[in-house]
Amino acid sequence: MRNALGREVPDTRAGKPTRPFAGAFASAQQGKKASRPQKTSCRTEDKLLPSLQAAIEATGLSDGMTISFHHSFRDGDRLINLVLDECARMGIKDLCLAPTALFPVHEPAIEHIKRGVVSRIEGSMNGPVGAFVSQGGALREPAVLRSHGGRWRAIEAGDIHIDVAFIAAPQADRYGNACGMRGKTACGTISFSAVDAQYADKTVVVTNELAPYPVHPFEIQQGWTDYVVVVGEIGDPKSIASGTLRLTKSPTRLHIARLAADAVISSGVLKDGFSFQGGAGGISLAATKYVGDAMREAGVVGDFAMGGATTLLVDMLHEGLIRAILDGQAFDLDAIASLRDDPAHLIMDPGHYANYDSRGCSTYMLDVAFLGATEVDLAFNVNVNTHSDGQLLHGIGGHQDVAAGAGITMITIPTLRGRLPVIVDHVTTVTTPGEAVDVIVTERGVAVNPAREDLRDRFAAGGLPVKTLEEIKAEADRFIQPPRRPVFSDEIVALIEWRDGTVIDAVRRVEEWR
Amino acid sequence: MSQVKIGTENKGDCAVRVERGEAGIRIDAKPLVEPGLRLLVEQIADRCGAEKAKIEVADFGALDYVVAARLETALRQAGTGKRCNEPLEGGLDRKPTAADRLRRTRLYVPGNNPRLQVGIELHGADCILLDLEDSVPLSEKLSARVLVKHLLWAVSFDEVWVRINPLDTYGDEDLAEIVPGRPHGVCLPKTETTDDVARVAARLAELESKFGIPVGSTRIMPILETAAGVLHAEQIAGADPRVVVMAFGAEDFTRDVGSKRTRETLLFARSQLVAAARSAGVQASDTVFSDVDDRDALLEETRHVRDLGFDGKGAINPRQIAAIHEGFAPPAAEIEHARRVVAAAEEAEQQGIGAIAIGGKMIDRPVLDRARRTLDLAQRMSAGRGL
């Protein structure tokens, strides 16, 4: 069937009818949340088990079940590989892997897919596993990619049922309280897993540092935890900054950031109480810095900044430019320390900030967001998942949740990456629909969604180079020969869910390039 | 003839190898861009009249104009192709500019580094200055001038200049290559005498008439950066109608005279240059400031040279543009005062009074002229982005 964006999506998913994407805020849930089995504990119970194998045995994990993980260690995670290796050793097969995200460090998962240990994936894929899945034939069902908020919603709704949640915890007590901001390998918040811990049939906290009761803050609570295991290594926080976190020196990228900041200034939202979301990409970081400069100059104090927390946001908090940081995940070591030490640096789990089926999202409180893209098209649709060659190489992160929520959603992109255009007639994959995107900022000009005439007028009055997307595209295309486009087979390798659980697009296997 | 290698494996560039032998093209690029690149290479080889050329192109994200330049250079160096004097696709969009246009910034861009060239026209610099001199090693002079020519064809610049090498080194070859790219002007480093200007003017006239460009339309910016140059500033400024702006180069100047770079040691040269420029009715542009990260010091130096009478300043990084433009912006109080002076003058003229006064204080002609200049500058600056 075709969804509201005209994208062809399968009629059924795992035997049930597909809910096609109908609009950013078109669906409304009815019914109740899912739940987990009741369990009563007693005074003499000891949750601490001697080994990962013992924990896996205790959970009753068996063929065909679903296991979950968080990605707070990003490219420094050790736990997913550890658990998959153990499962393989124990002869468990046909698992569904449902992490919040996979990174290049998880490349060994490819072997486990080939050997049948893993046969399904419900989670974002960054890098090699995504590339492997794009080639087709690897998984029993198409992989499912969800946004941060979308995954939380899906677990609450019972769309994903987690049999065993494994939670890497830099510090835990033997009764199952755990947090991410303390301990030798502190990684920031681990609250991505809070929903797993509450909805999984069994919850296993895996730590490398057992500490006296009570470990706090209670990101993962004793009342949710079945077992605790101590292992040598769960992750390396030094690898958290996996390539995205550099203050750029590229004149083009700095120029885009400057235009984005000027757009914020011209829009009129930069006043006391201002709020924004800054990503961790080079352009977003630089734009955040420029916005901070403008706030300082104008004497504006913002209510909050949200996002992957970085040194930059921490500095703004300490300087008094913003009153609070809402921290979904730490992107560097300063952010981890600040989360631990500063009471205005707050843990923000995805249910709090992004859950479509909830009674409130922090993203709806945002004035401005800076987001990236691999491609955008003339209808303002954004792709963050696939490259122009059709390879599935990135997760969704919070892109959909933030884009749908923020008052002004800006996509900051260069017009060209090498000889490939970033602005295309039709994106390879729709991650975020054009209706959730207000402004596209490029080095060649700023394009405003026709639905936001108010912004276009303000930008023009502020002296910004306002152009149509068509004009910017034409300017950029003059520098390159048109590239080929991928030709896709009918085989669907992954589904992209919109944050409400509908299917916004399907990723198909690339057959050839033409 | 052995194999010629041109270009690099850096991002935004391509590495081209050409040798004489069995004709053929090998492209090493991502599958999506390979066919387009092959088509382009075929067109350029054809345009350069390549014969018996074995061509290999490895792409690292080079734009079309970079590929064209690298391939043309390689073919010529291998002796299998000739110079292109026209762009591959017709329309060169180069509008003439006013002699006295706003030239607060002249942004130096290395001539042989594609990565630093892409999008350089977008940062709001008043003039772009593509450099063939100091930023280009001797072995890359040909590559650089061919790349600059193709860049001139590919991009519509508001105002673009090329800094050539001195005529007694490679300047003549530079001119022959880049004049078909129709830059608004050429910068002449280490200018010391009126003869230096005259020789470039004569060569420009020859090339302009050869390539069907209006004779006299290519301007000259002498750069004074030696003791002799500074001492001859007055003659140089008036040497040729092509000269519309004269620039100062402090690094070479201090080396030449054996001084240290301070405000005091540069004061004579700067003042001399401004006086010479004013007397000839041309603009004066100050030297570059090399510490890209020290915005405050750059702003201070810009305000200093603005007070000395300079119209502009060199920049070596796009990040410096905003600070320089801020430094040249007339302060609000000065604009307000200028408004009152001009208003008083207009009122006096209407009433047929010769003398102008504000609050009993007489305003003489130079003050009125200065006020008009301030208002003109303020008006022109607010017409831009105000960066």
Image (cartoon, coloured by chain):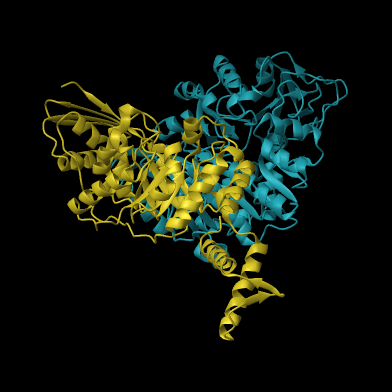
Q: Position of residue B359 (x, y in %)?
A: 72, 75
Q: Quadrant of the C terminus of chain A?
A: top left
Which chain did the image draw in yellow? B
Q: Position of residue A388 (x, y in %)?
A: 39, 42
- Vertical order, A221 against A484 (above or below): above
Q: Position of residue B149 (x, y in %)?
A: 29, 44
Which quadrant holds residue B345? bottom right
Q: Quadrant of the N terminus of chain A?
A: bottom left
Q: Which residue is at the front of the view, A25 or A319?
A: A319
Q: Position of residue B189 (x, y in %)?
A: 39, 40
Q: Residue at x 40, y 32 (%)?
A: A137
Display colour for chain A:
cyan
- Vertical order, A16 against A38 (above or below): below
Q: Which residue is at the front of the view, A322 or B300?
A: B300
Residue B51 in view of the camera: yes
Q: Residue at x 58, y 34 (%)?
A: A245
- Vertical order, A19 against A266 (above or below): above
